[in-house]
Image: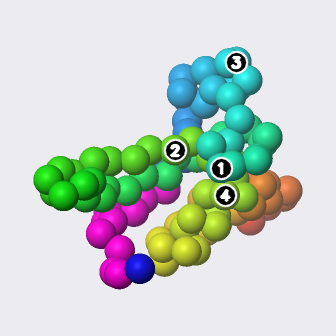
Amino acid sequence: MGASTAWGHAVVPLTGDKLALAIELGETCGARGCAKSPTWVTSYSYVTGRAGRTSKRHQRVCADHALNFADKHDLLLTHDARRAAAGDWDNYEEDQQP
């Protein structure tokens, strides 16, 4: 295969109403075979077909798949976002700086 035609990779947390709705509807991670709840959204743009149209893909994924996506595409997540993606919120308040 040739070089990738995708760009603009991003991963952001689902928050507020969108997260509540996903939980209420019982959504599962968009990664194949994963039954965990989605807590993040991955996205990127790509060129489709010979006509060269631009499309954008959004996928709701669990914390594990969000972290994998970020690592694969060299995306920098803040320390707090990386901890959330890993599900590591134990002692969170103790780690906060004054």
Residue that numbered label 4 is attached to = 65
Residues under labels 1 and 4: Cα distance? 7 Å
Stretch in magenta: 2-11
Colour scheme of the picture: rainbow
**CB within 8 Å, label 2 to label 1:** yes
**Percent position of residue 38, x then y:** 66, 40
Q: Identify which residue is drawn at 68% across, 42% down.
A: 29
**Percent position of residue 68, x then y:** 64, 67
- Which is more foreground, mark 2 or mark 3? 2
Q: Is residue 54 above or below residue 26?
A: below
Residue type indicated by callout 4: His
**CB within 8 Å, label 1 to label 4:** yes
Residue that numbered label 3 is attached to = 24
Residue that numbered label 1 is attached to = 31
Label 3 environment density (alpha carbons within 10 Å; few <14, some 14–19, many ≥20): few
Residue type indicated by callout 1: Ala
Residue type indicated by callout 3: Glu
Residue that numbered label 2 is attached to = 59
Residue farthest toward the bottom in the current orientation of the protein: 2
